[in-house]
Image (cartoon, rainbow, N blue to C red):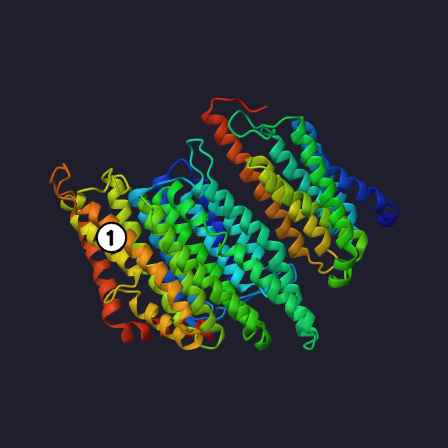
Amino acid sequence: MSAPVLWIIAPLLIALLFLLLGRMPRVSMVLGALFSSLIAISVLLMRVQFDYMIGSTIFQIESTFTVLGRVFILDNGARTFVFLFYAISAVYLWFGVFYDDEPTYAPMSLAIPALLSAAMAVQIRLFSVLFVMLSVLLCLPLMVKTDGESEHGEQFLLIFTALSIPLLLLAGWSADMVTVNPLDTAMMERAILFTTVGFTLLLGLFPFMLWMPLVGQQTRPTRALYVLLLLPIAFSLLLFNTSTRGVWFREAVVLQDWLTIQGYCMIALGGLWAVFEDDLRRFFAFGLVIDSGFALIAMRQAYLGEPTLLFQVLTIRVVIFILFTLAVNVLDAHSIPLTIKGLRGRLSQVPVTMLALFGVLFSFNGIPLLAAFSSRIHIVDVMMTSEGAGGWVWILVGLVGYFLGTLRFLGSVVDIRSEQKRVFNENWPEILFLSTGVLLLVLLGLFPAFTGDLIQTLWAGFVS
Amino acid sequence: MDFNLLEPYAVVAALASALLLLLTQNWRLFLFAMALQYLAAFFLVGLVWAPGLAAVKVVVGWMAVAVIGAVKPGQGIDFRYRSSKMGVLFRFIAVVIAGLTVFTITPLTSEWMGIQQRTLFPGLMLVTSGLLQLGLTGQLVRRFVGVLSVLVGFEIIFASLSSSVLLAGLMGMIHLGIALALSYWITVDNEVRGETPA
């Protein structure tokens, strides 16, 4: 038994079986959520290449699996991202059980993390992008609406990912050629060029980032947020993995500049577009655009040997997304329109949900004492030191824009002139989970050193 | 089978399919052009890969064409251009200019990447025609077929650089996946509009 069989092939087979349960969506959702949770727990608890005793039999989980001449390796370091992918799937499947029982959701949510794990595990990293493309293709059934409207966000996601394949394959090939001849500077330049353009398309960076708000707006909240959370994190980890190509790659000035400039563009443009946004889901997606900008700047630091900041940004993003998904689902379940107009005066009806919602939005703003503050301030500090005050202006523009947008939503929600009935609409489980989420956001903001250490411990294996 | 003898015909087939895909308004001719594109890819990849492995291109490609051909775009997702004859002329001129550009840059690119011109030229031509499809129209079918053309063209080029069973298999799955996604979209659209597939 090997880890790739347990955590890649077995989930894919289970996903195939779940397709047969298409007419019983609720059953497949519950089973899917259970399986995802089990896999996530098994990844957390089971160590690879460690002797386990069952009775008198000793068995060991191997780290490698060979198929069609290619090796897949999932060692103890890899358990971090495998756990992350399955844990996200498990949480979103549980959301689906209560709020959105779509027949294809369970099988796809098992297959997508399996394929993303395969992308990270395949040796000759060249082929990673092919598994990524397959996982994007599996995301499509989750996002296609059945009301016949054409979904541009999903189309853009598919087209950009498909167009990144040639570039990233050429980038991988060029990097492999550099391994053969380490003095080939022309090949190094090609590897860097193809990587930057390829990841610009794959990660949806400037000017290709508009698929994020489009997906956020056009698809059901749970599924849209699942895709918006999982894919960018997996793509970011793939980009981080390219740092293993060598010092020539990690410390290339062009690559560092690309990360910095893209980071600034994403932050500034995300904030500027968010100011005038009336749809809550699109507004949140612009928050993701800003967060991606910070992740890119953190990636630059990760390339220079300080990956903790990047993992902090990504981990906090997971918490923010989960809380937002819960809040949006509660609003959706109570038929509250997710627009600035629809939210007018709703504070008295769903106060805890609104508290969670604004906790999330202000966290994306990097407001002090909330989750993202410490990582944001650290990134700004680093950029001020290395780039001077110029970069700070871009970051300021983005954050002020997003803050003003958040204030517009806040103003609408607390509007006392509204004629909404003052009926308390939340049930106790919702209040409990939402309050816990808000508490977590505050704790992450109040004790950044403690949570930073925790996050570092969680990701330590991956870095090694 | 001597792939070297068939190479000139494969290049012509690739160019013809690129031109047809951009210009035709006839659904069957459109599908034929797609099938021709995959056939050309088979013969061009066969120049550098084992025939058995190269055959994956045509088998999977024709399966993708069959999947797309099984549904016919209706009123909602139409594949026809909404433009006059001048539009056709414009697209023809665009293809010719793109072809001349590709013809001009092929020797330089061949030197830069270390790939023979005989596979690079048709490959680049298909990539360019795919990008033109993506850029010239917002129609779903043409966008997706444009993506497929880009990938086919790239595979012809990349075959000279890397040969792998896993690569061939995964690329095949991607082609099929994109075709399935397209036909799914068309089916959903047809169902909503109460139209029956062809």
Which residue occupies the foreground of this view, A16 or A133? Answer: A133
Residue at image position (67%, 42%) is B61
- Left/right placement of residue B141 relative to residue A229 reads right
Residue B43 placement (x, y as % from top left): 79, 46
Which residue occupies the foreground of this view, A162 or A210? Answer: A210
Q: Which residue is mark 1?
A: A407
Residue at image position (13%, 45%) is A348
Q: Secondary structure at mark 1?
A: helix
Looking at the rendered structure, the kind of residue marked 1 is: Leu
Image-quadrant location for residue A176 = bottom right
Q: Residues within 10 Å of mark 1 (few under 14, many from 20)?
A: some
- Residue A123 visible, this angle: yes
Chain to which the residue tagged by mark 1 belongs: A
Which residue occupies the foreground of this view, A301 or B41? Answer: A301
Residue A455 placement (x, y as % from top left): 35, 71
- Residue A76 visible, this angle: no
Image-quadrant location for residue A187 = bottom right
- Considering only vertical position in the picture, is A347 above or below B196? below
Residue A63 placement (x, y as % from top left): 52, 69
- Left/right placement of residue A162 relative to residue A385 reads right
- Left/right placement of residue A71 relative to residue B119 reads left
- Considering only vertical position in the picture, is A18 above or below A69? above
Residue at the extreme left of the image, as rendered: A422
Residue A278 placement (x, y as % from top left): 31, 44
